[in-house]
Amino acid sequence: KKKGFIFDLDGVIVDTAKYHYLAWKKLANELGFEFTEEQNEMFKGVSRKRCLEILLDIGGIEATQKEFDTWMIEKNEDYLEYIEKMDASEILPDVPKVLEYLKAKKVPIALGSASKNAKPILEKVGLLPYFDNIVDGNSVSKAKPDPEVFLIAADKLGVMPKDCFVFEDAVAGIQAANNAEMTSIGIGDSDILAEADYNFKDFTEIDLDFIKKLLQLK
Ligand code: G16
Ligand code: MG
């Protein structure tokens, strides 16, 4: 059976959550309130628009449509300044090991991310050539935990959803993979990602024998 692998971006391949955080924090401070790293946890895997809605809720701010749009742009411009400086050193440990292995076995690979900046980030860190398909915030209408992003990815890869494996660091992402009836692999805290079929702290914990076993599943 043909298998496919789908990777989330933020928190799985690179740690861009810290840049999202700095950009949101700057906006919050400009608007006169604090935004903590703890609160930033809620933003993981969540669309930019939804993040701003939550942020304004935290600050108790009612925005006009015009203000809302301006702040969305402002946050993204600050975020892009961080992205601009990224290079291969920001790839999370042992991610290339797994990508390399899958490539060598000619297993199709897709990206399934909520980010509208996914492609430039992959380009910056030099991983774009590994991906057969990119499904990101520009091509989906329903946010995780809706399975849409992963179902489109499976379709593009030409692999049945049940034969796809998804690496995710966000609860909503694990739920999206499960909702797509794919095998979910949690990257991060196994207590938080308890709904995942498999759990690893990070890719250094993933043995290539494990990947091999997944490829041999019926
Ligand atoms: C990522 C992040 C979220 C971010 C979202 C949208 O999702 O985890 O924090 O808000 O993308 O990003 P952008 O503002 O670049 O469109 P993922 O699915 O890659 O973890
Ligand atoms: Mg993520």
Image (cartoon, helix red, strand yellow):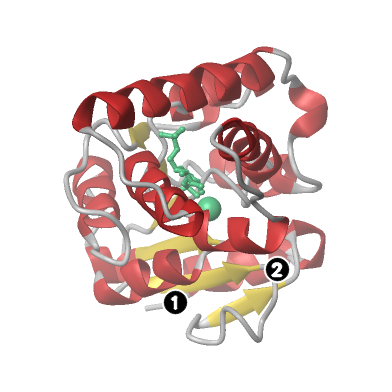
Residues 45 and 13: in front is 45
Kindly identify the residue that appears in the image at 53 percent across and 43 percent down.
9
Instruction: Provide residue 98's location: percent of width, then percent of height.
Output: 66, 49
Residue 97, by quadrant, is top right
Instruction: Provide residue 38's location: percent of width, then percent of height.
Output: 68, 64
Kindly identify the residue that appears in the image at 60 percent across and 26 percent down.
127
On the rendered image, what quadrant is the N terminus found in? bottom left
Residue 216 seen in this snapshot: yes
* Helix, strand or loop status at disc 1: loop
Residue 123 seen in this snapshot: no
Residues 68 and 154: in front is 68
Residue marked by disc 2 = 209
Left or right of residue 147, residue 82 in this image: right
On the rendered image, what quadrant is the C terminus found in? bottom left
Residue marked by disc 1 = 217
Which of the labelled discs sits on residue 74, or is there none? none
- The answer to whether the residue labelled 1 contacts the one labelled 2, judged by CB atoms less than 8 Å apart, is no
Left or right of residue 135, residue 5 in this image: right
Residue 78, by quadrant, is top right
Q: Residues within 10 Å of mark 1 (few under 14, many from 20)?
A: few
Mark 1 or 2, nearer chain start: 2
Residues 19 and 37: in front is 37
Residue labelled 2 has its Cβ within 8 Å of some atom of ligand 2: no
Residue type at mark 2: give it.
Answer: Asp
Residue type at mark 1: give it.
Answer: Leu
Kindly identify the residue that appears in the image at 62 percent across and 51 percent down.
12
